[in-house]
Amino acid sequence: MENPIRVTSVTGTTPGSSALPRGAEAGSKGAGTAELKLRASNLNFFYGKFQALHDINLDIHENRVTAFIGPSGCGKSTFLRTLNRMHEMVRNTRVEGEVELDGQDIFGLEVSQLRRRVGMVFQKSNPFPKSIFDNVAYGLRVNGFAGGKPLHDAVESSLRRAALWEEVKDKLNDSAYSLSGGQQQRLCIARALAVNPEVLLLDEPCSALDPIATAKIEDLIFQLKDSCTLVIVTHNMQQAARVAEYTGFFLLGRLVEFDKTTTIFKNPAQKETEDYVTGRFG
Ligand SMILES: Nc1ncnc2c1ncn2[C@@H]1O[C@H](COP(=O)(O)OP(=O)(O)OP(=O)(O)O)[C@@H](O)[C@H]1O
Ligand SMILES: [Mg+2]
């Protein structure tokens, strides 16, 4: 049976625009049937007095890729960070509204538990100043994994999932900084994957990478969908079109439109979306 997917209004920015149905029928062609994984409701975000997000309402489907696009400074990273409460590392921030993970309020969860379930990879790869092995083992050790073969096997499995194993298997004790930029980014993905997150947030993971490294990350995203729900911020619209089933367009802190990726790129409901995806602004 198809799962009921929420249809809510979008805070449209076009004067006179009507509230749009969204949530993109999950049973339709190309999207397949998907469960709801994350839900943001009436979400507002403030840095001090500055409101960076306005009334965001959005559903993210399990085992799907959801992309966020929009011009610089429109709130994409802020929204992504809110999903695993990474904003709490920034002083003087405030959130209003709700985010639910599998129907549970994320602000009621223990934060380390939430971040184990909802992992994050940043735009700039940020390996720890440790060996390749220890970078991936870090989260496992924190979660009580003893050393020895089980730890080695878990590290290997994460590096394989991140499509990096073959390139590093003979130098696991080398510094993570000895890797290329694209390899470091995949190492950070392996580190995030090691604790088996249910959701992986990727903030412009390919922005510093060449087309070959980018293709590897995109292949990886495609493969990870079986075991993970992926949310990606990208400035590369071809990338969103290639990897994501759903796309949201942000502008000035508002979610202008959210729908199936094909609709956003080929038949958007809002003029701002059309202008952006056709390169007329941004
Ligand atoms: N730590 C911070 N303190 C104050 N304001 C911030 C902070 N981080 C972001 N902002 C502001 O919040 C707004 C949204 O920023 P955010 O980083 O979420 O945008 P973005 O869409 O990810 O942009 P980009 O595409 O350039 O990464 C911007 O106006 C930005 O200046
Ligand atoms: Mg950003």
Image (tube, rainbow, N blue to C red):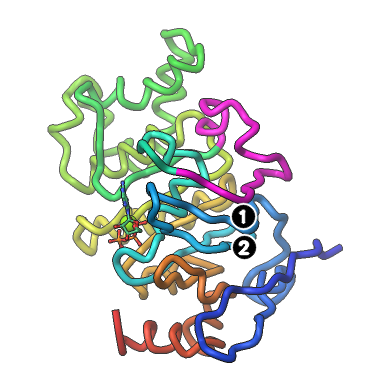
Give SS at disc 2.
Answer: strand
**Residue 216 seen in render:** no
Residue 93 in the image, given as x and y percentages of width and height = 42, 43
At label 1, the amino acid type is Ala
**Which quarter of the figure is the N terminus placed in?**
bottom right
* Residue at x 70% of width, y 59% of height: 34
Please report whichever mark, 1 or 2, sits nearer to the chain's N-terminal start.
1
Q: Secondary structure at mark 1?
A: strand
Mark 2 vs ligand 1: CB below 8 Å: no
Please count the marks in the image.
2
Q: Which quarter of the picture shows residue 42?
A: bottom right
- Residue 40 - label: 1
Asked if the residue at tag 2 contacts the one at tag 1, i.e. Cβ–Cβ closer than 8 Å, the answer is: yes
Highlighted range, magenta: 94-117
Verify whether residue 106 appears in magenta: yes
Quarter in which the C terminus is drawn: bottom left
Above or below, 137 relative to 115: above
Asked whether 81 falls inside the magenta stretch, the response is no
Mark 2 sits on what residue?
A: 57
Which amino acid, by three-letter code, is at mark 2?
Answer: Asn
Closest to the observer: 7 or 30? 7
- Where is residue 77 shown, x and y percent of the image? 38, 54
Residue at screen point 42% across, 8% down: 148
Residue pictured at 53% horizontal, 39% vertical:
118
Residue reaching furthest to the front: 49
For disc 1, the neighbor class at 10 Å (few under 14, some 14 to 19, many from 20) is many
Decide if residue 15 is on the left or right side of residue 202: right
